[in-house]
Amino acid sequence: METVAPFKEIVDAIKASGGDAFKRCFQCGLCDTVCPWNRVTTFSMRKLVREATFGLTDIETEDIWRCTTCGRCPQQCPRDVQQIESGVALRRVATQYEVYAKGASPLRAIKSNLNAQGNPFGEDREKRTAWTEGLDVKPFAEGMEILYFPCCYLSYDPRLKKVARATANILNSAGVDFGILGAEQNCCGESIRKTGDEELFKKLAKGNIKAFIDRGVTKILVSSPHCYHTLKNEYSQFRVNFEVVHISQYLDELAKEGRLQIKKGLADKLTYHDPCYLGRHNGVYDEPREILKRIPGVQFNELPESRSDSLCCGGGGGRVWMETPKSERFSDLRIGQAIEVGAEVLATSCPYCITMFEDSRKTMDVTEKIEVKDITEILQEAIE
C-alpha cells in the first residue's frame, strides 16, 4: 500500500528548503539526461518533481532515496529548479513519517549510531583516536597552526584509517603544528542531513561547533569533501565562521611554500577522479592534480568525464550507507573507465569515493589490474 504524503506537507517542506521548484520546472527533462542513474537503470527526477507538484509523491518509493546529490542536474537545469534541495525536502517528509524504502532501511541504524556515539558505525566514541597509534598526533590546543578533522570513515574504517595515517605522516614531515579533537568530535552531519534528518544534523553540528570554540579553533583541515562542504558552507547558518581547507588545497600550499619535500619519484600510471563535493560543488579541481604532477616519474592521464563533468561514484546523498544492487553501481563504470585509460592507480581525495571504488574493484575481480588510493597515500610514498 502506498503512503502518499499530504500535498501541503510536501509543498511546505520544499518551501522550507528554500525551493520554489514547482513554479519553475517546465519539464524539459535535461535533469534526466545527465543523471548517472540513467546509465545503470531508469530514474526520473523530472517525474519526482511532477508528482510532488500535484501532491502525489509516494514516500515509500525507492526513487526519493536514489539521488546522490552529485550536482549534475542543477548544473544543466535552465530554470534553477534546485533539484537537490527539493529532493532532500521529500526525504524530510518521509523521515517525519518514519517511512524508508527497502534500500534506505539501513538509515534507521545509522541514525541510532549517530545519536548514541556521534558516528555512523556505532563505534565507541573513545576509540575515535585509535588510528593515531604509534604516530605523533596530539590533542588540539589553542595556538596550534591547524585542527585536523578526520571524518568518521578515516577514524573508524580499517581501509580509510590508512588515509588518516598518511595525512598525519605528511603533516609531520612538513613540520605542521596540528592537533585533533579526538572523542569530542562528531560526524559533520552532511550525509544525514541529505537523507532528511535536519534535527540530527543540527545536534551533531552544534556539538562540533562547541568543541571548536572551546578549544580556540580558527582553521580546520579536512580530508573528506563532504566535511569540507558542510563545515565551510553550512555551519555558517549557526553564525560561526571558521577557515576550512581541504587536504588537497593544503598540500598544494605546503608544496608552494617549500615545506613539503618530495624525495623520490614513482613509476605509476595514474588517473584522478574528481569527487562531486570537492569539484562540482566547491570548484576544487587543480590542486589535487598539481600535487600528483609534482611527483617525478608519474604518468598522468585524465579520465573521460572529468572535472565539472565527473561521473559520480554513487556514495553521496547518504547512498554510501544504503543498499545498491551490483548492476546499478556507478562505481563499476568508473573503475572500467580508469582501466581503459591505462591507469594502474585510480587516485581520488574522498573517503566515500574510495569506499565505493574498493567495493567495485573487488566485485569486478580487477584487483590485480588497478589500485585505488587517496592522494595522501600516493604522496606519502614519494616523501618517505
Image: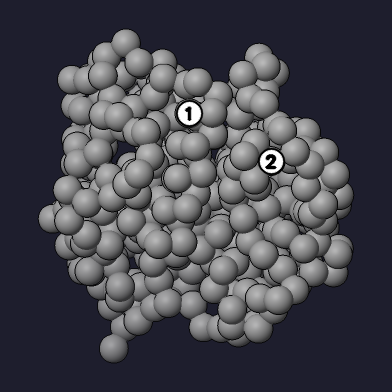
Q: Which residue is mark 1?
A: 172
Mark 2 surroundings: few (<14), some (14-19) or many (≥20) residues within 10 A: some
Measuring 49% from the left and 77% from the top, which residue is drawn there? 324
User: Label 2, label 1: how many angstroms apart (C-alpha)?
Assistant: 15 Å
Quarter of the image for residue 17 reads top left
Q: Which residue is mark 2?
A: 382
* Image position, residue 248 (x, y; %): 60, 34
Residue 353: tell me if it is visible. Answer: yes
SS type, badge 2: helix
Identify the image quadrant of the N terminus.
bottom left
Measuring 86% from the left and 49% from the top, which residue is drawn there? 299
* Image position, residue 277 (x, y; %): 55, 45
Q: Earlier in the sequence, mark 2 or mark 1?
A: 1
Left or right of residue 321: residue 127: left
Mark 1 surroundings: few (<14), some (14-19) or many (≥20) residues within 10 A: some
Vertical placement of residue 114 versus 355, above or below: above
Vertical placement of residue 7 versus 126, above or below: below
Identify the image quadrant of the C terminus.
top right
Q: Residue furthest left?
A: 116
What amino acid type is highlighted by mark number 2?
A: Ala
What amino acid type is highlighted by mark number 1?
A: Asn
* Image position, residue 205 (x, y; %): 26, 37
Measuring 17% from the left and 48% from the top, which residue is drawn there? 126
Left or right of residue 325: residue 265: right
* Image position, residue 346 (x, y; %): 70, 58
